[in-house]
Amino acid sequence: MSTLKAVYPGTFDPVTSGHVDVIKRGLRLFGSITVAVAESTEKRPLFSSDERIEMVKECTKGLKGVKVKKFSSLLADFMKKEKATVVLRGLRETSDFPQEFQQAIVNRLLGKGIETVFVMT
């Protein structure tokens, strides 16, 4: 098992079976995954960040190596705080790729040593 720490960021509004699938598949690749629930005000989430955290915790109960935390900083700063080096992202379709690609480049530039791993959902 890898000792790499991954962060799976998102709003998770609400958490879906697709999100849980990405987490489970990520656990096969990484030693631990922190699900980083964003405090997004721009997206106007349906659920509060505390409600979304509780939903993710409920859906991942029993999955060893999963932590759930709130974040409101730059992802690169959150990753440094968590001592994580991998961003885990799920791609639903090809139209997701351009934005995800740009975010991966920015994260790599802002956080030395940060790599992004995409899994197909």
Image (cartoon, helix red, strand yellow):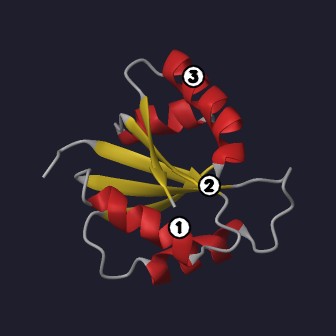
Q: Which residue is labeled 2 in the image?
A: 10
Distance of label 1 from label 3 (alpha carbons): 22 Å
The residue under label 1 is which amino acid type? His
Q: Nearer the viewer, residue 61 or 25?
A: 25
Residue 44, position as x, y percentages in the image? 87, 61
Q: Is residue 72 visible?
A: no
Residue 38, position as x, y percentages in the image? 65, 54
**Residue at x 64%, y 53% (from the top left corner):** 93
The residue under label 3 is which amino acid type? Ile
Q: Which residue is labeled 1 in the image?
A: 19
Residue 16, position as x, y percentages in the image? 59, 75
Q: Is residue 40 above or below residue 63?
A: above
Q: Which residue is labeled 3 in the image?
A: 105
Tag 2 near tag 1, CB within 8 Å: yes
Tag 2 near tag 3, CB within 8 Å: no
Camera-near label (2 vs 1) is 1
Distance of label 2 from label 3 (alpha carbons): 17 Å
**Residue at x 86%, y 50% (from the top left corner):** 42
Residue count near mark 1 (Cα–Cα under 10 Å), binned few <14, some 14–19, many ≥20: some
Q: Earlier in the sequence, mark 2 or mark 1?
A: 2
